[in-house]
Image (cartoon, rainbow, N blue to C red):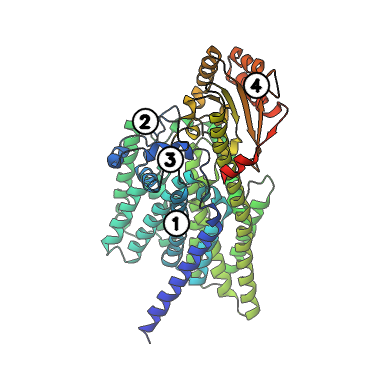
Amino acid sequence: MNAAAPDRRGTSVAWAALAVCLAATLPYLSTINNYFVRDDFGVVALLSGKPAGYFPRWFVTSWMDQIWGHTPDEVRPFPALSYQLTSLGGAASPFLHHVLNIALHAANGLAVLAIALQAARLTLPAATLAAAIFVLLPVHGETVAWITGRVDSMPALFYMLSFWAFARWRDTGSRERGWYALSLVLLFVALFTKQTTITMVATLAAWDLVVLGWPTAWWPRVRAYLPFALLTAAYLALRLVLFGQVVRESTLNAAGARYFGLLFQHHLANVLVGRVSANLAPWAVVIACAIAAVILLRRLPPESGRRALALLLFFGPLWWIIGVAPTAVAGYESPRHVYLAAAGWALALGILADLAWLRARTLGRHRLVSAVAVAVCVFYAVRLTAVVGEWNRMAAVSHHAVVDVRREVLASPQGSLVIAGAPTRSWEWAVPFSVRPPYTRTDLTGRAFIITPWLLHCCRGQWLDDTKRILHDWHAHPGPVVVLRWDPDSGQLSKVTEREYPALRTVAEVLLQLDSREALDANILRMVEELPVPVPMDPGSARERR
């Protein structure tokens, strides 16, 4: 009888893990063949072209070289290796890239499940709920559906597993050193996956202080952090040597603090309600959860109540603050930046669900708790479906743009000036990578003079010089002018040539006289958006796309 109980427990956990994997996978199956968008073109083109033995060099250099016009302060050998591996199916094929992204998301869901079961000691249904909520959060749409979003799901996985192994070690009374060593190794991988994981020491200390409590002899507990702190310090010293800065400290000023305050609110809304919201809905959710926690904790035995409160404080405000803190120096806003922080929200909801279930004494109340849990999952799943659908549209338009530019360049006389106005949300940072191998058979910039609006160019600081150089080269041996634009939702191509608009060449020549980035960009955008006589894509090109 006793021997059968662990077997049943193991079987139940396996079914829970399967449910979490399905919840993580099914919403993203439609992205499995989505085309490259935005940074994907540059990232995949660079890393797929590196030799097999390049991996060790990424520990002492930026993984992106200078493809964005500068050297990013990013030492990321493990993500770089992952792009090499997912390019083995063909650098121009997005399939394996998306497969790994979805697999990483499912693995993160399992990590949340493990933390909920082992560290938080939730019941299996509550732990499963926490993991399911995490993988269904619509804020993760960018991280999973966008190939480049992997740079946030990978470090989150190693970070959470490192914390889980440390918590397991503490549970053994610090006897089984294997868990401790595993936690340290996983932190090493996390650090060299993304610099935002430098907060691990704070997370471990907060766990000990808030949940486990400080013993009378505090030194043995603090001593456990030293290898983690030394590893983190060595990593930060490497960053200082390589890039001349530790944590982008130049952004830590009053203006940066104000921007971080805005980011904090946006990230909170994105995680809690699935979109950036200017109203009070996110704070209403926080207040409602706080009130629910007070009600549920009131009648618990003192010891159980203290632990439940400690877990809510740790996975609620503390995990969130530690997880969001690195966005203060990110320099821009992106939903994927709170992938790790969102795990705390999911775990906090799991803890509340566990408390509510334990406090429910009647069948009707149990059904109410279950109904609320299902409603939360459905709410997030519906919002996630909309987010994934948006990424599907962006990828489809991006593919249309690549195919159409290739067709138009090859059909036009050599030396033509092609002004490509692809939608920014599909092609931001994409040019010139998107018009070169491996995405096209030949380098289209060798056959035509291709210019785009500023936001589509890979290297913002070089765009003005590059665009003026291309225009001067074209003007020296002027060929026909073609303006291309795409509907941002359908990908429908519209084309304007000198045949439909005889003054097009004159308008293009005016661009040569503009010396400021703002003026040149504004005039290129005006050509793309305002020139008349759009020509619909012909049926033959539609067949080519398919």
Q: Earlier in the sequence, mark 4 or mark 2?
A: 2
The reply to whether dot 1 and dot 2 touch (C-beta < 8 Å) is no
Q: Position of residue 295 (x, y in %)?
A: 61, 67
Residue topped by disc 2? 243
Residue topped by disc 1? 103
Q: Position of residue 512 (x, y in %)?
A: 59, 14
* Residue type for callout 1: Ala
* Residue type for callout 2: Phe
The residue depicted at 51 percent of the width and 53 percent of the height is 32
- Mark drawn on residue 523: 4
For numbered disc 3, what is the local secondary structure? helix
Q: Which residue is nearer to you in this view: 292 or 410?
A: 410
The residue depicted at 49 percent of the width and 57 percent of the height is 315
For label 3, count other residues whose C-alpha is less than 10 Å away and answer few (under 14), some (14-19) or many (20+). many
The residue depicted at 49 percent of the width and 26 percent of the height is 445
Residue topped by disc 3? 44
The residue depicted at 52 percent of the width and 38 percent of the height is 38
Q: Earlier in the sequence, mark 3 or mark 1?
A: 3
Q: Earlier in the sequence, mark 1 or mark 4?
A: 1
For label 1, count other residues whose C-alpha is less than 10 Å away and answer few (under 14), some (14-19) or many (20+). some
The reply to whether dot 3 and dot 4 touch (C-beta < 8 Å) is no
Q: Eyeballing the image, is 525 above or below 394?
A: above
For numbered disc 2, what is the local secondary structure? helix
Is residue 264 visible in the rendered structure shown here?
Answer: no
Q: Which residue is nearer to you in this view: 239 or 533?
A: 533
